[in-house]
Amino acid sequence: METGMLHLHNILRWVIIVLLLVTIYQAFAKKQAIKSSSLWLMITAHTMLLIGLYQLLLGRYGILNTSLPEGVSLMKSSFFRFYWVEHPLLMFAAIALITVARGRAKVLNYKSAGWLLLSALIFIIVAVPWPFRGESIGRHLFPGM
Ligand code: HEM
């Protein structure tokens, strides 16, 4: 179950990025279809939030079942700082922006939705553990690789 959750979390990242790109295009091109794409984006983002919370609390490095190694402090370990603080906080912020943007998209406030979604995309690009982030933080582009 744990591996399944991690794989789902990994693959849904691509769904969110593609949906974000489509929705941002629709916002700046003022397309009414933004009403449904922003809804799908929000549903996917909230699903990601639930899976992320599960991983953060109960996953293989979950806060509730992992103790920091002797002599390691949270903010001084790049691994724990990333997975327990930076990644969750930036992703929370991105999901909040996506949620507010959905409200704006619903009433066809295109410009506001567009800027909010663009900010969310930047947060996500910054906070994803891309392979180039190094051996301890970096993860594969696709699950099970
Ligand atoms: C749009 C939102 C998010 C994206 C795009 C995202 C993306 C990712 C990716 C690509 C991984 C690596 C998966 C792998 O190793 O195969 C990951 C791991 C992780 N994410 Fe997220 N994430 C998001 C939201 C969250 C949130 C909100 C939380 C916490 C509340 C969270 C907690 C974690 C944790 C703890 C891991 C490490 C799990 C492990 O190695 O066992 N994520 N995330």
Image: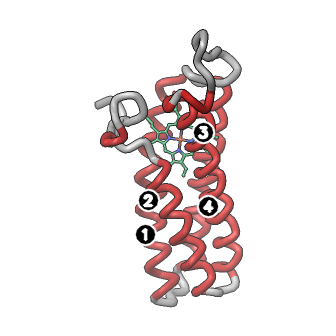
- Whole-angstrom CA distance, mark 3 to mark 2, is 16 Å
* Circles 2 and 1 in contact, beta carbons < 8 Å: yes
Answer with left or right where residue 107 lies relative to residue 29: right
Q: Earlier in the sequence, mark 3 or mark 2?
A: 2
**SS at mark 4 in the image:** helix
At 48% from the left and 38% from the top, the residue drawn is 8
- Whole-angstrom CA distance, mark 3 to mark 1, is 22 Å
> Can you tell me whether the CB of the residue at mark 2 lies under 8 Å from the nearest atom of ligand 1?
yes
Compared to residue 31, the image places residue 57 above or below, namely above
Q: Please, what is the three-letter code of the amino acid marked with disc 2?
A: Ile
Q: Which quadrant holds residue 116?
A: bottom right
State the residue position of label 3: 52
* Circles 3 and 4 in contact, beta carbons < 8 Å: no
Residue 140 picture location, percent across and down: 33, 37
State the residue position of label 1: 21
Compared to residue 85, the image places residue 135 above or below, namely above
